[in-house]
Image: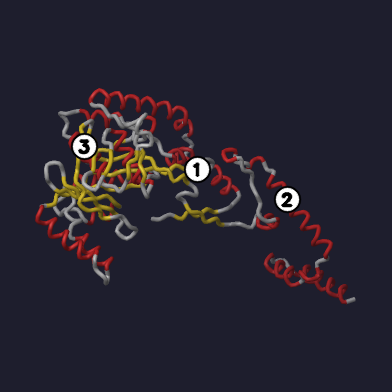
């Protein structure tokens, strides 16, 4: 009788309830009277559903020979209840493999590649036919061959790896090889900075059979991509020792003496390298976020160059690229010696060491001059655009977490 009375109450309660939330509360309140046989049937259904999910051919990843592997039989309970998905971007949606696609040098933009973000925007605007992948790849291959031919006629780059060249721009090769052009000196200074301003290590995996094959190891894939791009354009970083840093500039060897390395961190948002040039001068190269670099430019900096470089970086960012600003300044011998003593004292401080180092860095990282800007693309993993579109069709909102 007690069970019958409870069922009567439930029936009357459901007749009076139209709100879904109240209905859910009702199920929770009376879950203790669900028959055991029904519970077993539900578990069997869940098991069968998990099996079908594991056997779903559309969820099979051929590259790793891996099907979908449900970790719990209760996974079907969550289907249709998810409204928001929060995801990391770097290394999750992307491959964490950086490629230098564009650059801006002395107010002139270089780079012919089409980013995945641009292709996605064209697709949304219904311009799919103008962004055909095969057509673009063929065009890019022709442009790359034209660029390499122009460079090979002007100088020999023993360390080049043409198949890994990502910064494709015939105009860049033309300006770089045109001795009558003022732009040539700016390009040389820019790519020389990329070859010097880093903490990358150069390795020769096959020194006997392939003595000019260089591989770069870096803490950050961004740095490795920038140094590799400089190598393939004609400015390879050859190696570094305690006494010297060796690069080549359009086939000519140059050696610099490393003096100090001011490392990058999330607070500084920049890194600097101080080296002594072959002619004895001391130069500071600095690369970092545009906002940080622009705060440290010399007051009498060329306003047109500042504005044009900023416009190029905004254009790069709108194309889904990660930007860095490159700057430099010459340091006098007396200023460097005075600063070096201050910096050494800060690194040896026992109290407020980080603050003292930041103060010391600020004494030298100022009055900078812009060399240009770089734009890196972090390629999406295969199937990411399609997966996001499927989630959108299912009414699921995707939030991407980035470091910006």
**Crowd tier of the residue under label 2, counting other residues whose Cα lies within 10 Å: few below 14, some 14–19, many 20 or above:** some
Q: Name the residue located 33 percent from the left edge and 31 percent from the top edge.
A: 211
Left or right: 82, with 305 as reference point = right
Tag 2 secondary structure? helix
Per the rendering, the mark at residue 188 is 3
Give whichever of discs 1 and 2 has the lower sequence position: 2
Give the residue number, with chain letter if any, for mark 2: 49
Residue lying furthest bottom in this view?
2
Q: Position of residue 97 (x, y in %)?
A: 42, 43
Q: Position of residue 48 (x, y in %)?
A: 75, 50
Seen in the picture, residue 390 relative to 166 is either above or below; the reply is: below
Residue lying furthest left in this view?
334
Per the rendering, the mark at residue 381 is 1
Q: Name the residue located 55 percent from the left edge and 55 percent from the top edge.
A: 85
**Crowd tier of the residue under label 1, counting other residues whose Cα lies within 10 Å: few below 14, some 14–19, many 20 or above:** some
Residue lying furthest front in this view?
208
Tag 3 secondary structure? helix
**Residue 47 visible to an observer of this rendering:** yes
In the rendered image, which quarter contains the N terminus? bottom right
Seen in the picture, residue 201 relative to 17 is either above or below; the reply is: above
């Amino acid at each position: 009788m007690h069970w019958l009375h409870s069922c009567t109450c439930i029936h009357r309660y459901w007749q009076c309830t139209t709100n879904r939330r109240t209905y859910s509360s009702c199920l929770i309140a009376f879950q203790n009277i669900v028959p055991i046989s029904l519970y077993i049937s539900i578990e069997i259904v869940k098991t069968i559903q998990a099996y079908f999910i594991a056997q779903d051919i559309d969820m099979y990843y051929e590259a790793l020979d891996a099907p979908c592997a449900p970790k719990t039989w209760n996974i079907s309970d969550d289907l249709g209840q998810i409204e928001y998905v929060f995801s990391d971007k770097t290394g999750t949606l992307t491959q964490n493999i950086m490629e230098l696609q564009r650059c801006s040098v002395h107010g002139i933009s270089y780079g012919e590649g089409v980013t995945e973000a641009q292709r996605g925007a064209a697709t949304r605007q219904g311009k799919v036919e103008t962004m055909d992948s095969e057509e673009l790849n063929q065009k890019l291959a022709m442009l790359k061959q034209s660029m390499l031919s122009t460079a090979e006629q002007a100088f020999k780059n023993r360390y080049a790896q043409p198949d890994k060249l990502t910064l494709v721009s015939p105009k860049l090769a033309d300006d770089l090889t045109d001795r009558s052009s003022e732009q040539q000196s700016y390009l040389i200074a820019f790519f020389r900075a990329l070859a010097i301003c880093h903490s990358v290590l150069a390795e020769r995996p096959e020194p006997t059979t392939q003595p000019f094959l260089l591989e770069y190891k870096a803490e950050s894939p961004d740095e490795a991509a920038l140094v590799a791009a400089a190598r393939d354009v004609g400015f390879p970083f050859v190696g570094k020792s305690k006494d010297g840093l060796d690069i080549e500039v359009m086939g000519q060897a140059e050696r610099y003496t490393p003096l100090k390395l001011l490392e990058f961190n999330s607070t500084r948002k920049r890194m600097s390298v101080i080296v002594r040039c072959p002619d004895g001068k001391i130069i500071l190269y600095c690369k970092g976020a545009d906002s940080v670099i622009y705060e440290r430019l010399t007051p009498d900096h060329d306003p047109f160059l500042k504005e044009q470089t900023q416009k190029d970086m905004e254009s790069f960012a709108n194309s889904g690229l990660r930007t860095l600003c490159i700057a430099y300044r010459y340091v006098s011998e007396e200023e460097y010696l005075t600063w070096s003593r201050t910096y050494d004292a800060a690194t040896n401080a026992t109290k407020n060491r980080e603050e003292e180092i930041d103060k010391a860095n600020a004494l030298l990282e100022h009055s900078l001059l812009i060399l240009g800007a770089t734009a890196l693309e972090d390629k999406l993993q295969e199937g990411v655009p399609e997966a996001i579109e499927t989630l959108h069709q299912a009414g699921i909102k995707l939030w991407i977490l980035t470091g910006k």
